Amino acid sequence: MDQTLFKSLCKAGKFKEALGLAIRGHEDEKFTPSRFSMDKKTGLPIFYRGNKRVEPDETGEWQLAKNPNP
């Protein structure tokens, strides 16, 4: 995913297009995100499927996010 294009789409108010860019090629996976929010500290998107946080693994397939706090 191209981060600069993603951010420019968000700034332009085209949130559906930005989400479509993030999931392109992985639309039919079980944990494909249905929404996202922007992290205020890092400026990076955080993706969610329902109310569960998801992230792409090393192969690009969407998985449930691991808890960063052990």
Image (cartoon, grey):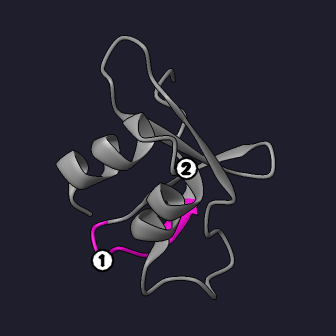
Determine the residue positioned at 54% across, 47% down.
Answer: 65
Asked if residue 5 lies left or right of residue 21, the reply is: left
Q: Is residue 21 above or below residue 38?
A: below
Q: Is residue 57 within the magenta segment?
A: no
In x, y percent, where is residue 9? 38, 49
Judging from the image, what secondary structure is the residue with disc 2 in?
A: helix
Question: The N terminus lies in which quarter of the figure?
Answer: bottom left
Q: Is residue 59 within the magenta segment?
A: yes
Look at the magenta stretch and give its main secondary structure.
Answer: loop
Determine the residue positioned at 50% across, 21% down.
Answer: 69
Q: Nearer the viewer, residue 19 or 9?
A: 9
The residue segment tinted magenta is 58-63
Q: Amino acid at mark 2?
A: Phe
Q: Is residue 46 above or below residue 49?
A: above
Q: Label 1: which residue?
A: 59
Q: Is residue 57 above or below residue 9?
A: below
In x, y percent, where is residue 17? 50, 63
Asked if residue 65 lies left or right of residue 28, the reply is: left
Give me the C-alpha separation between circle 1 and circle 2: 25 Å
Mark 1 against mark 2, which lies toward the viewer? Answer: 2
Asked if residue 58 lies left or right of residue 34, the reply is: left
In x, y percent, where is residue 38? 47, 29
Q: Label 2: how many residues lie within 10 Å, few (<14), some (14-19) or many (20+)?
A: some
Determine the residue positioned at 52% across, 59% down.
Answer: 19
Q: Label 2: which residue?
A: 15
